[in-house]
């Protein structure tokens, strides 16, 4: 039963069947988003996966200085309720399960799993780099995928990062692609389990889901279980980030929303 619940929380394959990678969005909210918001004064308007959970913190101070991105929030009663629901799910289910997993599974194995799933999402990054005309980025992503899938044994290792540091991994997704074509965020939405999003990014999640190999695994329960495992493994590296952010924020709902929107704006403009 617990596995089924976790499976639903991480399903980003389509909004009916797809949330770290980006489950990474209330539970997959980027680490850099969390800490970026923590180092800036709180906003009065206002939130934030892929998701909780990326690792590069270099741009935290720069992002913290950006002005708030204004996006319509007509669904605020629903969004606040779902924000509260996701918060409880994190503390009551995802966090304790992840703590047990981290205690049992050695870090080297968890790193290999993280590398594997990151490599598996390469088609999303390649396709969206091409759609945005980022030819160099598309080539770098394809090259990383080829090297890590072969020399790196199906992506369990990441030799591309050590041997070819110039091939920086990207964070391209369909939501960014739509934004690069001038499509606005639309309204702000918080999905149960899936987390923080906008209308534009929700459409992006659905589209990206068709490029994710696990989307085509049958039966569907198996695909859900894989996504659940991916979420637990990713969360095992970042327990405490969500707590730190929430504690630092005067109004968590608005703080998460502001950080999410500012980060997505930064990605679109890159």
Image (cartoon, helix red, strand yellow):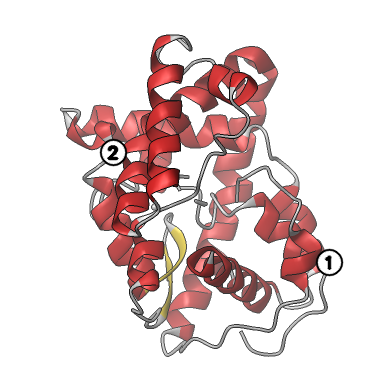
Lateral position of residue 252 relative to residue 171, left or right: right
Image coordinates of residue 194 in percent, x first then y, are 42, 56
Q: Is residue 12 above or below residue 249?
A: above
Mark 2 nearby-residue class (10 Å; few <14, some 14–19, many ≥20): many
Lateral position of residue 102 relative to residue 113, left or right: right
Task: Tell me the residue at 26%/32% (across/down).
Answer: 213
- The quadrant holding residue 95 is top right
Task: Tell me the residue at 39%/52% (across/down).
Answer: 19
Evaluate if marks 2 and 1 touch, with contact meaning CB atoms under 8 Å apart. no
Task: Tell me the residue at 60%/32% (across/down).
Answer: 98
The residue pinned by badge 1 equals 39
How far is mark 2 from mark 1, CA to CA?
34 Å
From the image, which quarter does the C terminus lie in?
Answer: bottom right
From the image, which quarter does the N terminus lie in?
Answer: top left
The residue pinned by badge 2 equals 212
User: At numbered mark 2, what does the secondary structure look like: helix, strand or loop?
Assistant: loop
């Amino acid at each position: 039963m617990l596995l089924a619940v976790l499976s639903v929380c991480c399903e980003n394959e389509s909004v009916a069947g797809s949330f770290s990678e980006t489950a990474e969005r209330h539970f997959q909210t980027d680490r850099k988003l969390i800490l970026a918001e923590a180092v800036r004064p709180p906003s009065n308007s206002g939130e934030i996966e892929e998701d909780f959970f990326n690792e590069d913190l270099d741009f935290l101070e720069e992002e913290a200085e950006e002005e708030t991105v204004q996006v319509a929030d007509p669904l605020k009663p629903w969004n606040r309720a779902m924000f509260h629901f996701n918060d409880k799910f994190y503390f009551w289910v995802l966090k304790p399960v992840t703590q047990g997993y981290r205690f049992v599974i050695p870090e080297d194995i968890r790193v290999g799993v993280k590398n594997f799933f990151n490599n598996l999402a390469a088609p999303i990054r390649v396709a969206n780099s091409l759609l945005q005309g980022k030819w160099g980025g598309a080539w770098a992503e394809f090259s990383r995928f080829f090297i890590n899938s072969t020399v790196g044994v199906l992506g369990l290792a990441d030799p591309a990062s050590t041997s070819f540091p110039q091939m920086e991994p990207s964070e391209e997704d369909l939501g960014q692609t739509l934004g690069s074509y001038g499509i606005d965020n639309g309204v702000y939405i918080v999905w149960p389990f899936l987390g923080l999003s906008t209308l534009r990014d929700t459409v992006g999640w659905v589209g990206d889901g068709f490029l994710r190999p696990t989307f085509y695994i049958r039966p569907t329960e198996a695909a859900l279980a894989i996504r659940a495992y991916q979420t637990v493994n990713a969360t095992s590296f970042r327990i405490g980030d969500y707590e730190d952010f929430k504690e630092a924020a005067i109004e968590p709902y608005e703080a998460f929303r502001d950080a999410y929107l500012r980060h997505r704006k930064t990605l679109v403009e890159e």
